[in-house]
Each structure stands twice: as structure tokens, then as C-alpha cells.
Amino acid sequence: MQELALFSIVIVISLGVFSQWLAWRIQWPSIVIMSIAGLLIGPIFGLINPQEALGNLYSPIISLAVAIILFEGSTSLDIRELKGISKSVFRVVTFGAFIAWIAGALAAHYIAGLTIEVSFIIGGLFVVTGPTVIIPLLRQAKLKPRVSSVLKWEGIIVDPVGPLLALFAYEIIKITSDEAFHLLHFIPFFIDSLSAVIVGYVIGLFVSWLISKGLLPEYLKSPIVFCFVLFTFSVGEVIMHETGMLAVTVMGLTLARTKKHVHSISSIGHFMENISVMLTSTIFILLTASLARETIYEIFTWPIISFVVVMLFLVRPLSIWLSTIGTELTFQERALVSWVAPRGIVALTVSGYFAELLMNDGYFNASLLTSLTLALVFITVCAHGFSIGPFAKKLGLANTESTGVLIVGASSFSIALANYLQNSGTPVLITDTSNDRLYKAKMLGISTYNGEILSEQSHFDIDMTPYEVILTLTGDAAYNALVCQSFIPEFGYHHTYILPAGVNKDEHTKLPPSIKSNILFGENETFIELNKKVNIGYQFQTVSFTEKTSIQKEKLTSYGIPLCLKKKSGKVEFMTLKGKLVIDEGDKLIVLNNIE
């Protein structure tokens, strides 16, 4: 039995991570791949059943994973994201959630055939979207910041609210069925909910204080915060079932609020994000692999399919369009938000809890809850996962341009390069702390940002969506290295490049191959040399290739100084100290040449 549990855990984790990688490779929504993988190894082929293998540990593992994912999502929120959309977000998470609750409950009763009591419980639960499904979709679709912020805030704030609404509806059913019913009977529910909020807030403040006073060593900071998250969740669950999620969300929001005052809190983010990505993929596989075949068969019945269609095309649009009347959102933004509402882990886990609870209370049609939830989760994940990108592009709310380039540092060379790339159809943004150095770039019509790229504020002033490559081209080698290192988590190692200020050829030979793939251009092309060449009249040229070839970079110097390769797909690949280069038919090489 122990060996079976170990094997199941290893298979689930490996398959979850592989599903994420496969989704990235084929550009499919990762949630869709994970759901299919779980169904294949579980109910379809019956290879493993994680719920049976893990036994009593199954539910606690899933609950703790959801808590960590919620905490990571809430710490990523920043109040500055709400600039210009605060009214919309407030309306969506309050009035919009209430409409979705009532309309969803009526749909469950009149279309899915559930009793009115069960319908109002499941209607409250179905208001959730959640970071486990929303954030991967937003990452893939590359939405513009405003609409992306609305969807992210809604998913994280409403995620713990949904189970509380379901629990509140359940309390109403229990209390009103008692002959000695009195409104005062609701007081314990609200006290417990408030207690969970206070626990999350106090622990969040305490952790922030520990970090600000330097009482946690750097190497233990993330593990200790991780333990506090688990502790907060467990205390919330002891207070009242399903309030643990509320407690960790409040804790995360509290840390997010203090993050701008205690900068070192930000360093925890990368650790929690990596854990969250692994847990998201693992939990989806766990849940779908543990489903019974009968549950899958029940999905394909008209009442359930009709209910999902009504939730997609009536309940969600109605709640968003009504709640956002008179807000800052444009017609296009309201249309996209009204369409995107995938359900995920929280809906699946909590519905199973309420199904068992209600059946024990004599509501036998509650057995449909798992099938109903699975149908809503799988269909919304597929529908929204495959459509969010094309729909956002149709509405003008996603980046449709080719790979953009973010250049740090304004100089003669960087401005000339930016101008040439922009004229060839590549979006470019130049950032610099000096407005005077940016003056020429502005005159050429190049997008600019006057400010410190390393400051936290720059992330809210600059829409990073169009840019996939960052070049650090200042004359300060240490600053270039710092910027490069800071943006590797956001842009990726292979899309982050640095220009040496003045490294000689002998020092280049001592560099490891991994570093050479990030250092731009050639052994003699430094900041000083490139700017000197541009100032004395060197110009940019494009060399087209009519056949595929694999060539050493040194052989391209006959065309000039090779700088970058513009692929037929629109992507831009920059030359580095790494030797070999593969050029496809239709690719264009951009060089710097001395034209006499």
C-alpha cells in the first residue's frame, strides 16, 4: 500500500509538470492538457486512483495545496494595479458575485433539476474562478493590463468567497429547518468568518514584522513563510471548515500591502510562484484521476449540459454586464470579462465536500454535484482556454504584434538600433533615467520610458505585454548585469541579453558557455566601440537568405557586424558570443556596416 501511494505521487507530479511543458510547446491551455492527462490515467484507463492510494491524506493534501496557491496569488496583488479600474473590480467581486450566485442557483434548480436548497449551496460555490485557472490563461493570452487585472483580482478575491457563500447557504438551510429558528443563530457563522480574517491579518502583520526587523535569515525566509501559510490555513479550518482559504488570502493581501515598505518580502515571491506552478499541475491531475467512470458518464446528460450552457452564455454575461454598468471598463473589456470565467480546483474539491454532507442530511440528488461541477470545470476550461486568445485579439485587448524588444539605456547605438528595428516592424521601447538621453529617441517616434527600470513602480507604468526580449545596453557593466539578473525570472534566461561595457578578448575566452549565450554580439563589440562606430557613420543593413543554412557566426562578418536575426515568424534572435547559428529560408540578418 505504501509503495502504491509513493508510485501514485511520483506519477502525478511528473505527469503534471510534463503537461505544463507540453502545453507550452504546443501552445494549448495547460489546464486542458492536465485535465485530459488526469482523465486518461484515472477513470478512462484505470492506471491509478490517487484517492484510494493516498487514503486519508488525499483531502488534506489537496486543501493545503489550494491554500498555498491562494496565498501566492494574493501576495502578487498590488493596489496600484487597480488604478483606473477600482470601481469595476469592487462591483464584480460584490454585486457581480451576488448576481452570479442567485442566477446560478436558479439555473441549477430549474435546469439541472436540483432541489432549491442544494441549488443555492452549489450556486454560491460556482461564483469562483480562482488563480489556479485564471493566471495560467492570462499568462498564455498576453492580455492588456487593465482587463488582466480585473480577471486576476476577481479570481483571487472571490475564490475564498465562493465556499463561504455555499457554507452560508448550508447554514441557512440547517437553521431555518429548525422549529426554534431565530436570526441570532447566524451570529456564530459571522463570528467564525471574522475570526478567520483576523487570524490571517494578524499573522500577516507578524510575518512582515519578522522580515522587516531582520529576524529571519535569508536562506530560511521562504521556508518559514511557507510554514506560516500552512499554520494559518490549519487555524482557519479549526475555526470553521472552509474558512482556512479566507485566512490565507487575507494573510497574502496583508503581506502584499506591506511589500512596498519591506522590500525583502518580494524575494519570497519567486519561491512561492515555483511551488504554486507545481502544485497547480499536481492537484489537477490528482482530482481528475480520482474520478469514477460513472461521474464521467453522468456529464453527458441533457440537464447537465444545458446547465453548463446557461452558466456560460447567460449567468456569467448577465452578472458582469449588470455589475459593471457605469464603471471605467470599455465595451470590449466588459465583453471579454463577461466571457472568461473558468472554474477549477476549489469548485471540484468543495463540491465533493458538500455532496457528502448533503447526502448525509437526506438530499439524495446532491449526488449529482460532482458530475455537475466536473462538467462545468472541464467545459469552461476548454471553452475559455482555447477562445480567450483569439477573442481578446478580436476585441483589441491582446498583443498582436511580433516579438517586441525592451532596451535599457539610451545611447547613439541603442537609439539607432531601436529605430531600425521599429522601421522593420518590431515593437521597441527604450528606458533610461535621463530625459535628455531619451530626447533623440522621442524625436524619432520610438516609445520611451523615463525612469528607473529596476524600481517596482516601473512594472505598473510599463505594459510589458508586447516585449519578449530585454537588452541591457548602458555603459555601466555592473548595472547591466544587475538588470539582466533581475529580469531573468520575467523574460527567461534565453531572452535576456547584456552588452559588455569594455571586456577584452582574453577575458571572453575565460567565460563559461552558459554566460556567453547572454553576452551580445562579438568579442570586440562593446558599448564604447559600437557607439563610436554609429557616431562616425556606420549604418544598419538587412541581408536576406534564400535557403536554410547552419553557419559559424564568424563567417557572417563579411556582411558587417552581425547583430540579430529577424525570423520569418517575426521573432528576433540576437547574436551572442555563442558560436553556431541556424538560418532558415526567408530569415533576415541585421548587420552594422561601414558604408562609404
Image (spheres, helix red, strand yellow):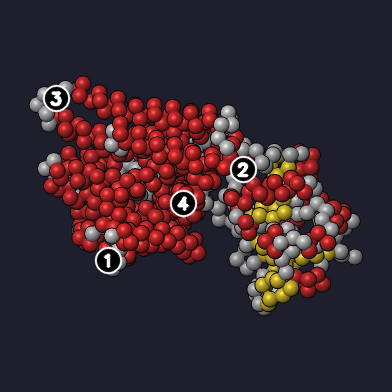
Task: Measure how far apart labels 4 and 1 are at the Cα level.
Answer: 26 Å
Task: Tell me if residue 487 can be seen.
Answer: yes
User: CB of mark 3 within 8 Å of CB of mark 2?
Assistant: no
Which element is circle 1 on? loop
Disc 4 residue type?
Val
Which element is circle 2 on? loop
User: CB of mark 3 within 8 Å of CB of mark 1?
Assistant: no
Q: Earlier in the sequence, mark 3 or mark 1?
A: 1
Q: Earlier in the sequence, mark 4 or mark 3?
A: 3
Q: Earlier in the sequence, mark 4 or mark 2?
A: 4
Q: Nearer the viewer, mark 4 or mark 2?
A: 4
- Check disc 3 and report the residue beneath it: 181
Task: Measure how far apart labels 3 and 2 are at the Cα level.
Answer: 56 Å
**Mark 1: few/some/many CA within 10 Å (<14, 14-19, 20+):** some
- Check disc 2 and report the residue beneath it: 462
Disc 3 residue type?
Phe
The single residue placed furthest to the front in the displayed view is: 2
User: CB of mark 4 within 8 Å of CB of mark 1?
Assistant: no
User: CB of mark 4 within 8 Å of CB of mark 2?
Assistant: no
In percent of width and height, residue 511 lies at 74, 60
Q: Earlier in the sequence, mark 3 or mark 2?
A: 3
Disc 1 residue type?
Gly
Task: Measure how far apart labels 4 and 3 are at the Cα level.
Answer: 46 Å
- Which residue is painted at 14% across and 43% down in the image? 360
- Check disc 4 and report the residue beneath it: 277
- Check disc 1 and report the residue beneath it: 46
In percent of width and height, residue 465 lies at 57, 49
**Mark 2: few/some/many CA within 10 Å (<14, 14-19, 20+):** some
Q: In this picture, is 388 found above or below 578?
A: above
- Which residue is painted at 49% across and 39% down in the image? 224
Q: Is residue 156 left or right of residue 533?
A: left
In percent of width and height, residue 506 lies at 83, 61
